[in-house]
Amino acid sequence: MAIPKPSIPKGTRDFSPVEMVRRNYIFDTIKTAFSKYGYLPLETPAMENLDTLLGKYGDEGDRLLFKILNSGDFMKGAEPTTNTNALSLKICEKGLRYDLTVPFARYVVQHQNDIIFPFKRYQIQPVWRADRPQKGRYREFYQCDADVIGSNSLLNEIELIRIMDEVFSQLGIRITIKINNRKILAGISEYIGEAGRITDITVAIDKLDKMGEEKVFTELREKGIPMEAISKIKPLLKISGKAEEQFEVLTKTLAGISTGLRGVEEMHKIFSGLKNISTLNPVEFDVSLARGLNYYTGAIFEVKATDVEIGSICGGGRYDNLTGIFGLPGISGVGISFGADRIYDVMNQLKLFPADVSAASQVMIANFGEKEALFCLSLQAKLLEAGIRAELYPDTVKLGKQIGYAVSRNIPFIALIGENEIKEEKITLKRLSDGNQQSFARQDLIEYLKNQ
RNA sequence: GUGGUCGUAGCUCAGUUGGUUAGAGCGCCAGAUUGUGGCUCUGGAGGUCGCCGGUUCGAGUCCGGUCUUCCACCCCA
């Protein structure tokens, strides 16, 4: 009888207490920022009906959806077939959520009569993707979303940029916020005479900074974009300089293409709005930024860490018709999503976690025996009342072992109360960093620890 | 989904063209030291060599499959 080694599914992880304390530090920072700007918390179920999810993320997204096998006699009414894709749709009615935006759109439509627009919500929950795991890419990971839905104002975009800037500044991560606009990309597609090929074109263009110009053009050619069209894109990708200068070039190039011009106009407004607030991190306009999710229709954002190669750690954009697919057209929303797991990896690599991000006790009371331990319960109670995190070592073992335990758990002080101390109504406090010991009366000890 | 890669003690890793009983450092446990950690010394525990199968007199080593890790595509947080 071989007992299988315990394990967890590919691409999933356990989080140890040390990791959780640090993860919570990230979540708390983000949560605080969100609620500061008036976003309210929301949670939706881990699983959604499959038809809520399907078709919202493109073919690639559909492939990456985790499907949930129906309970009971799931093969009832389904014919065995080699077409596993078709079969899976018959025997799976539910799937794990792929992101937080689509479930949010579903929620908004379902509760439209109870919601006051503009509706600002934040949501911090795990999502699942059946992708091949790699560094910074997991099958279960957390997204931290903030969206405002039911408002067309570009002030929302500006606010979200501000939140991204604020959160990363607080975490100590140096970043660049990149912005583009889907309308500009649509305009460019139209300008080169390939209006219907926005997705192919943008997906290729998105690889510019990673693969270089040559490969992007090769990919475009392979996708069937004529040389003529490609040569018209070339100069557009080369434009650089200040955002305003780039807008000028684009305005001239896209003359007569109303969608594209509106995109430039939106970007222009956002950038002039940003002048009224001072961001700590650079905000750049980047025509080559595309982003995969095809429900974006306006501004798109992406945040890259300056000091670590890891892909984007935050992204988002405006979507004009996400609720339309659920039967509520004409409502526009814009949102951002922080990738907590990647942010963790970045901070870990850069050693950015503050040393005092720890939930350890401030003092541990040593256990000298049954009688002494009972006596110490009242001391622990007094310490706790005074707001000092204190624990009592549960077993009577050699003092050296107890000290070792406190050291390895980063507890700075150990209180020693044995026979002598009880008799003299004193407490010996040992500082573990240097081994220094001092004797205190009970009240003095509390005061001393409070001031640490 | 395509192609590749890795897996030996809790951790980091040795292990010769297949050859007898698979090693080291660190960590862990116990003692030296019954109220004092990090140093020192002594001793000890811990491995179905990821898993299943094959080749062979003999497999940690070779072959196939599978799982996992990491990587490049694809795509993405």
Image: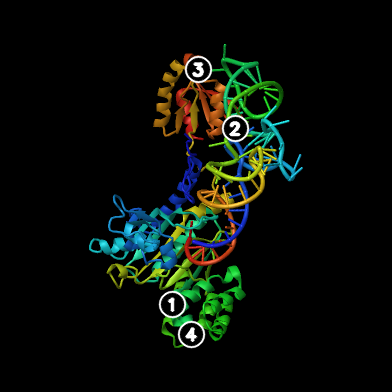
- On the image, the x and y values in percent for residue A372 come to 45, 17
> Distance from label 4 to label 2 (Cα)?
68 Å
Dot 1 falls on a residue whose secondary structure is helix
Q: Return the residue at label 2.
A: A433
Q: Return the residue at label 1.
A: A183
**Do we see residue A240 in this rendering?**
no
Name the mark nearer the viewer: 4 or 3.
4
Residue type at mark 2? Ser
Residue type at mark 1? Lys
Question: Quick one: label 1 or label 2, which is nearer the N terminus?
Answer: 1
Dot 3 falls on a residue whose secondary structure is loop
Nearest the eye: A224 or A294: A224
Disc 2 and disc 3 on one polypeptide chain: yes
Dot 3 crowding, Cα within 10 Å, few <14, some 14–19, many 20+ = many
Question: Quick one: label 4 or label 3, which is nearer the N terminus?
Answer: 4
Dot 4 falls on a residue whose secondary structure is helix
Name the chain under label 1: A
Question: Quick one: label 1 or label 3, which is nearer the N terminus?
Answer: 1
Name the chain under label 4: A
Name the chain under label 3: A
Q: Which mark is residue A418?
A: 3
Q: Which mark is residue A142?
A: none
Q: Return the residue at label 4.
A: A191
Disc 4 and disc 1 on one polypeptide chain: yes
Asked if the residue under mark 2 is in contact with the one under mark 1, i.e. CB atoms within 8 Å, the reply is no
